[in-house]
Amino acid sequence: MFLTELFRTATFRITLMALAAMAGVMVMQFGLVYAQMEAVESRRSTELLEGEAELLAQMSPEHLEYVIRRRATGDLRLIISSAGLFDAGHALIAGDLHSWPHADSRWQAP
């Protein structure tokens, strides 16, 4: 009988509303932090890839082939199983990826 009376009190209901509000605020904070970190990491990755592309574009073809071959056989081999450098016509310039990869529909731009 005591529990049913406790559930009906205004103090108990206010406490439940306060707990629900705090839980909602915590979820919003986690969401905000996640969104901010995702934006920062996305921007950082984009800047890194664009800088790398500019650097590689300035290299001579011979040096570029050397760099691609060195990267394809270095420590990154544990993470990246194959690599290739292709020209605008999708012809292989350097690397061990012998054909242009087919696009996966999940990764295509809208």
Image (cartoon, rainbow, N blue to C red):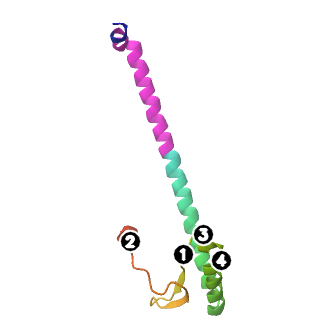
Q: Nearer the viewer, residue 85 or 98?
A: 98
Residue 43 sits above or below residue 14 on the image: below
Q: Which residues are magenta?
A: 5-31
Label 1 close to label 4 by CB (< 8 Å): no
Give the mark nearest the N terminus, 1 or 4.
4
Q: Amino acid at mark 3?
A: Leu
Q: First in sequence, mark 2 or 4: give its number.
A: 4
Label placed on residue 108: 2
Discs 1, 2 touching: Cβ within 8 Å: no
Residue type at mark 2 is Gln
Asked which secondary structure carries label 3, the reply is helix
- Residue 70 figure quarter: bottom right
Task: Give whichever of discs 3 and 2 has the lower sequence position.
Answer: 3
Q: Where residue 48 is drawn, which disc sits there?
A: 3
Using the image as rendered, state which of residue 63 and residue 47 is in the foreground.
63
Q: Which residue is under mark 4?
A: 74
Residue at 44%, 84% (x, y): give it: 100
The reply to whether dot 1 and dot 3 touch (C-beta < 8 Å) is no
Residue drawn at the location 39% of the way across and 79% of the way down: 102
> For mark 2, does the 10 Å Cα neighbourhood hold few (<14), some (14 to 19), or many (20 or more) residues?
few
Is 16 magenta? The answer is yes
